[in-house]
Image (spheres, rainbow, N blue to C red):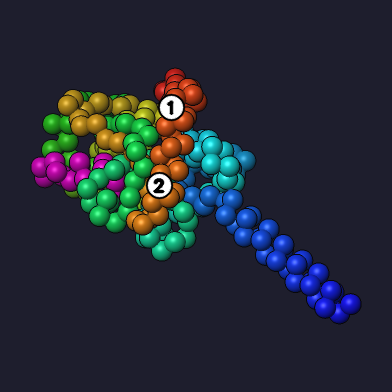
């Protein structure tokens, strides 16, 4: 009887551990810097929202996994991924050669280019050429930062999140903010007194989902999920939803 009882206890423990493992494996942990609307932000109810969040939820659904988002400062996103704090990251992050040295990326899921945000009453800036010698605010370490840094005689002001860079412009402490175009249009939609200047000939940039090097299985699964969403029309519906409001 004792042997039989011990067998039942052991079996119960194995089932409990097995259920725990399955539960852990069913969670997709994703890092993001939720301060870059309309791609990722915290809504009025305190929930993650935005294009990237909705796309990640659709991918998690395709994988049969529960989505768990983590809000991480921009500078800590890649280090956190490399440290194993989450399975992948999505944060309107452009695929660049420098970043590819640190992490892998999914296939591109969105294309954008840089744009300039200035105050409506600013008549001195009408194109990218007019940024020469000006004070430019940017989100630190972004492609907007890289682009603006190449302009002659500019004074760079780098911030930990995009809202801080925009606030610096509003406070008349900088002449312009450089950021991704869809984010720029979302900014002027929500804040009066600002306008967008398109950059003629700006190169197209591609966003990707960041995955830790060596995690080839997850990379393949995410790429397959993106393919599925593009083929069944759900991806196009999501893009249309966000582009139609700007």
Q: Secondary structure at mark 2?
A: helix
Tell which residue pokes out farthest to the left in this image: 152
Q: Nearer the viewer, residue 3 or 155?
A: 3
**Mark 1 highlights which residue?**
230
| Residue 136 horizontal side relative to residue 133, left or right | right
- Viewed as shown, does residue 165 lie left or right of 128? right
Query: Crowdedness of circle 1 by 10 Å Cα count: few (<14), some, many (20+)?
Result: some
Badge number at residue 160: none
Res. 242 in view: no
Q: From mark 2 to mark 1, how far is it between C-alphas?
A: 17 Å
Q: Residue at x 36, y 57 (%)?
A: 214
**Numbered disc 1: secondary structure:** helix
Residue 126 vertical placement versus 152 (above, below): above
Q: Position of residue 83 (x, y in %)?
A: 41, 63
* Image coordinates for residue 199, horizontal then vertical, percent: 21, 28
Q: Is residue 198 above or below residue 64?
A: above
Q: How many marks?
A: 2
How packed mark 2 is, by other alpha carbons closer than 10 Å (few <14, some 14-19, many 20 or more), is many
Left or right: residue 11 compared with residue 148: right
Residue 119 falls inside the magenta stretch: no
Can you tell which mark lies on residue 219? 2
In the picture, the quarter occupied by the C terminus is: top left
**Residues in magenta?**
141-154
Q: Residue at x 26, y 41 (%)?
A: 144
Which part of the image, by quadrant, shows the N terminus? bottom right
**Which residue shows up at 60% across the image and 57% down it?**
24
Res. 86 in view: yes
Q: Establish if 12 lies above or below 132.
A: below
- Left or right of 77? Residue 4 is right
């Amino acid at each position: 009887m004792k042997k039989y009882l011990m067998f039942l206890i052991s079996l119960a423990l194995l089932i409990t551990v097995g259920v725990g493992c399955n539960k852990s494996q069913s969670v997709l942990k994703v890092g993001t810097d939720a301060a870059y609307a309309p791609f990722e932000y915290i809504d009025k109810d305190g929930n993650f929202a935005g294009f990237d969040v909705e796309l990640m939820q659709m991918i998690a659904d395709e994988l049969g996994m529960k989505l768990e988002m983590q809000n991480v400062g921009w500078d800590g996103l890649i280090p956190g991924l490399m440290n194993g704090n989450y399975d992948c990251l999505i944060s309107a992050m452009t695929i660049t050669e420098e970043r590819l040295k640190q992490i892998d990326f999914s296939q591109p899921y969105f294309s954008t280019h840089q744009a300039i945000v200035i105050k409506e009453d600013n008549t001195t800036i009408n194109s990218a050429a007019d940024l020469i010698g000006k004070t430019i605010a940017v989100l630190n370490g972004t492609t907007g930062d890289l682009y603006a840094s190449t302009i002659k005689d500019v004074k760079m002001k780098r911030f930990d999140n995009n809202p801080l860079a925009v606030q610096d412009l509003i406070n008349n402490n900088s002449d312009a903010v450089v950021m991704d175009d869809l984010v720029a249009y979302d900014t002027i939609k929500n804040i009066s007194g600002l306008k967008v200047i398109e950059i003629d000939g700006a190169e197209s940039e591609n966003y990707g989902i960041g995955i830790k090097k060596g995690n080839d299985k997850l990379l393949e699964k995410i790429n397959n999920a993106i393919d599925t969403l593009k083929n069944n029309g759900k991806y196009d519906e999501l893009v249309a939803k966000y582009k139609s409001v700007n």
